[in-house]
Image (cartoon, helix red, strand yellow):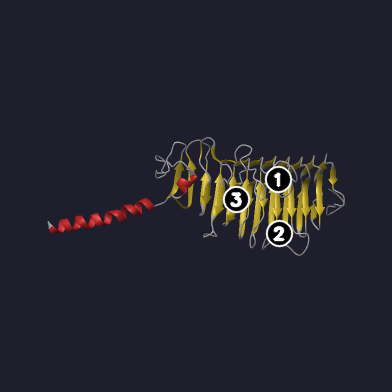
Amino acid sequence: MKKIALIVGLLALAAPSLFTTSAQAQATRTWISGVGDDVNPCSRTAPCKTFPGAITKTAAGGEIDTLDPGGFGAVTVNKAITLADEGVGEGGILVAGTNGITVNCSTDPNCVVQVRGLIIDGGPPGSNSLSGIRFVAGKALQVQNTVIRNFTGGSPNGYGINFNPNGPAQLDISDCVITSNGQAGGGAGIGAGVNIIPQTGGSANVTIVRTTISNNSNGIRIDNTNAAAPTNVNIRDTTIANSGTHDVAVVNPTSGTPQKDTVTIDHSTITNAGGDGVVANGVNSVANLNNNVISGNGKGAQTNNGGVINTYKNNAFTANTFDLAGGTTLTPATAL
């Protein structure tokens, strides 16, 4: 009897630590629901309610899926994760005065974050929300089949996607709609659909395919002023339209020897910008144009301060106030 009592006593002492280990275990796949509760384990039958509630219970490299339509809260991501809505209705993040998703994998340089199928909304006019997705640190951000809209905070905010890596990083955008970001009537520095501006020590490789970027203060803005290495952006089968200032802007300092920033635009439509369809401004700023329609802009193409625009002689410039702004030439200069 004494041996039995001793065993029972030892089990009783061990039980709290056993329960603690179980409670801290993280699943590789978790679920959230509009009728869930963040005290739940985030299982399919007992889902959580928000992304912040689920991310603490999801292992690095795991996935959080929506079970039904709902608004699931702004979230800061500090590990590899997938945030996904798989067509069960509008799964979204609705915010005011903040970022929708912040990616800051400061302790994991190999972190890859995927955002798929979500609606990320900065709220009604006056909400002054910052960015739909802001990337600070990590290896890569992949955004697929997602709508990002209504992020209208003032400079240095107001971006659909604000890609600010502090090291080498990859951004991939596919099959998305990025619209109504930035401040109406704002200048070159106040908002954009996609902003690519590496921090000191950072650099970026970017692909954008089959995406609509429309009605933003600027469409795509690439600024390599602080980058530690060249930045390369490849855009294909994409529409960039109705920007208040520039549809595509490649920006560098106007003197010195900054790292090169290059955008290659292929089989895309660049239309109805209030200012420039494509502008390359500053030393080592380069835009390559292949088989695009550039139409209805104030200026179809513009170079300033040593910027260069190259053409493959097969672009259609039409109905711009000026196809080429005064003094702008394309290389080769014999054809658009």
Mark 1 and mark 2: Cα distance apart in space: 19 Å
Residue 166: x %, y % from top left: 61, 59
Q: Is residue 38 above or below residue 308?
A: above
- Badge 3 is on which residue? 134
Q: State left or right for residue 235 relative to residue 38.
A: right
> Which residue occupies the extreme left position in the image?
1
- Badge 1 is on which residue? 219
Lower position in the chain sequence, tag 1 or tag 2: 1
Q: State left or right for residue 335 relative to residue 272.
A: right
Around disc 2, counting alpha carbons within 10 Å, would you say few (fewer than 14), some (14 to 19), or many (20 or more)? many
Q: Secondary structure at mark 2?
A: loop
Indicate the quadrant containing the N terminus: top left, top right, bottom left or bottom right: bottom left
Residue 209: x %, y % from top left: 66, 46
- Badge 2 is on which residue? 225
Lower position in the chain sequence, tag 3 or tag 1: 3
Mark 1 touches mark 2? (CB < 8 Å): no
Lower position in the chain sequence, tag 3 or tag 2: 3
What amino acid does circle 2 point to? Thr
Mark 3 touches mark 2? (CB < 8 Å): no
Q: Secondary structure at mark 1?
A: loop
Nearer the observer, 261 or 160: 160
Residue 302: x %, y % from top left: 81, 50
- Residue drawn at (67%, 49%) of the image: 155
Residue 328: x %, y % from top left: 85, 52
Around disc 1, counting alpha carbons within 10 Å, would you say few (fewer than 14), some (14 to 19), or many (20 or more)? many
Nearer the observer, 160 or 229: 160
Mark nearer the viewer, 1 or 2: 2
What amino acid does circle 3 point to? Arg
Mark 3 and mark 2: Cα distance apart in space: 18 Å
Mark 3 and mark 1: Cα distance apart in space: 16 Å
What amino acid does circle 1 point to? Gly
